[in-house]
Image (cartoon, rainbow, N blue to C red):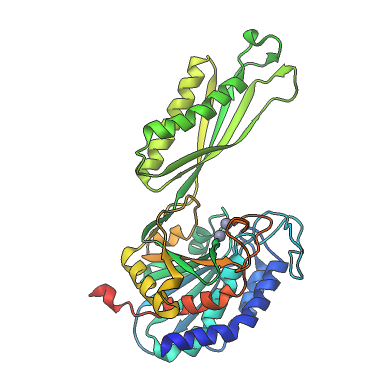
């Protein structure tokens, strides 16, 4: 009975979720401070039943907690609220009204689905045990929002038995789900290499030390380094994404800079790539009699789904929607997520929900972070039913 009920309730909630999603999409907010979004969420939640807490400082988190009368597990559902610094390149009635800011990663849908799930869980509160907290966190897009929420006391992570989240996937057909046990998303690090040479006239390079030629050699050598250093069965990526140096055609500059990202799934691979990158940069610079500085900036950890909880999520999803709408991802992805911060302390699962419109072919579907990202809002009915069902699923088998 329960599963059909969650399904039916979520369908009834779809107009509310669409309205909320459009308001959030219309007024996207960046980084750790999303006050307008926080207000919209608190107004849309069923405040009569659960308790709402708000982050009132620099980090505008919001938690909504529902308690059953019976003892049971404490479950955390996580949604994210921030947008991206992208100019929306698509015109609809609810397009972004803020220049240069757009919800292009679907966090407007994540938030609206989590509000929908809160409503469903209120209606079904006599049918599950324990407590369920929905955390709406800002600052996912590179601002370490999860760490800020924890430092700010939004939740006491150690009190939770499991944590779940959904992320939209524009390559997957709307209403379909994709799960993966273990490694789901990579950990990321940023690197910066500054090559210091000696500037001079571009016609007399032998009188200076050309940093640009050396920077180009480093960029190419890093690709060889990855393939010759890292075990091919342990995925790793280094991408030089920015090269900067020089000012005009007839001046050899004194320095050049390379900036890029390192992606990996283990601490050992990450350390291997850091030390190898440093060695390659130093070695090439030494060969050409120039010097360099290398620095790294920590990013998010890898997102690793708990295998036993992934099995339970898969079972719950196929009970809700049927086997045909759930697939197992064959490989992990090289994107990264700060959901991994919670997974460092609490077992949990991030699941992908398809948001590709049925009329849009796979080849032309705009990816996440595209200025043309255009998700199917109807997927939110399935997403809310999924979140409510997963949050209230029976975890007792886990402890047997
Ligand atoms: Zn994103
Ligand atoms: Zn995202």
Question: Which of the 4 image quarters holds residue 204?
Answer: top right
Residue at point 62% right, 72% down? 377
- The answer to whether residue 10 shows anywhere in this view is yes
- The answer to whether residue 156 shows anywhere in this view is no
Residue at point 63% right, 8% down? 206
Question: Which of the 4 image quarters holds residue 355?
Answer: bottom right
State the residue in front, 32 or 212. Answer: 212
Residue 163, percent from left and from top? 42, 69
State the residue in front, 199 or 400. Answer: 400
Residue 363, percent from left and from top? 59, 55
Q: Is residue 390 left or right of residue 368?
A: left
Residue at point 74% right, 70% down? 94
Residue 303, percent from left and from top? 43, 56
Residue at point 25% right, 74% down? 399
Q: Is residue 187 left or right of residue 369?
A: left
Q: Quadrant of ligand 2?
A: bottom right
Where, quadrant-wise, is the C terminus in this rendering?
bottom left
State the residue in front, 275 or 317. Answer: 317
Q: How many marks?
A: 0
For the view shown, which residue lies furthest in the left direction? 400
Question: Which of the 4 image quarters holds residue 104?
Answer: bottom right
Q: Is residue 247 above or below residue 188?
A: above
Q: Is residue 359 above or below residue 286?
A: below
Where, quadrant-wise, is the N terminus in this rendering?
bottom left
């Amino acid at each position: 009975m329960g599963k059909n009920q969650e399904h039916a309730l979520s369908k009834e909630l779809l107009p509310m979720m669409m309205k909320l999603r459009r308001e959030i999409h219309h007024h996207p907010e960046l980084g750790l401070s999303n006050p307008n979004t926080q207000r919209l969420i608190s107004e849309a939640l069923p405040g009569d039943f659960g308790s709402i807490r708000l982050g009132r400082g620099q980090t505008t988190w919001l938690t909504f907690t529902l308690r059953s009368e019976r003892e049971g597990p404490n479950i955390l559902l996580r949604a994210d609220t921030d947008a991206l610094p992208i100019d929306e390149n698509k015109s609809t009635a609810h397009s972004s009204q803020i220049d240069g800011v757009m919800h292009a990663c679907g966090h407007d849908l994540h938030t609206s689905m989590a509000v929908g799930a809160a409503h469903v869980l209120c209606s079904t509160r006599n049918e599950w045990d324990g407590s369920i907290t929905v955390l709406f966190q800002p600052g996912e897009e590179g601002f370490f929002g999860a760490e800020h929420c924890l430092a700010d006391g939004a939740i006491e992570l150690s009190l939770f038995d499991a944590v779940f989240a959904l992320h939209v996937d524009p390559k997957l057909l709307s209403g379909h789900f994709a799960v993966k046990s273990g490694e789901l998303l990579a950990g990321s690090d940023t690197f910066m290499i500054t090559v210091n040479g000696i500037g001079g006239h571009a016609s007399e390079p032998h009188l200076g030390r050309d940093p640009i030629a050396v920077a180009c050699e480093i960029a190419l050598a890093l690709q060889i380094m990855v393939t010759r250093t890292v075990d091919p069965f342990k995925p790793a990526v280094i991408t030089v994404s920015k090269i900067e140096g020089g000012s005009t055609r007839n001046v050899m500059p004194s320095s050049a800079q390379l900036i890029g990202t390192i992606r990996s799934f283990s601490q050992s691979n990450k350390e291997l790539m850091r030390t190898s990158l440093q060695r390659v940069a130093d070695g090439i610079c030494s060969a050409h009699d120039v010097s360099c500085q290398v620095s790294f900036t920590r990013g998010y950890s890898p997102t690793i789904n708990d295998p036993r909880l992934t099995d339970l999520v898969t079972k719950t999803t196929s009970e809700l929607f049927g086997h045909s709408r759930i697939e197992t991802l064959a490989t992990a992805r090289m994107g990264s997520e700060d959901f991994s911060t919670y997974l460092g302390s609490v077992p949990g699962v991030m699941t992908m929900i398809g948001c590709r419109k049925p009329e849009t072919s796979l080849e032309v579907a705009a990816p996440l972070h595209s200025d043309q990202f255009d998700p199917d809002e109807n997927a939110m009915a399935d997403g809310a039913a999924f979140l409510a069902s997963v949050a209230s699923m029976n975890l007792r088998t886990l402890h047997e």
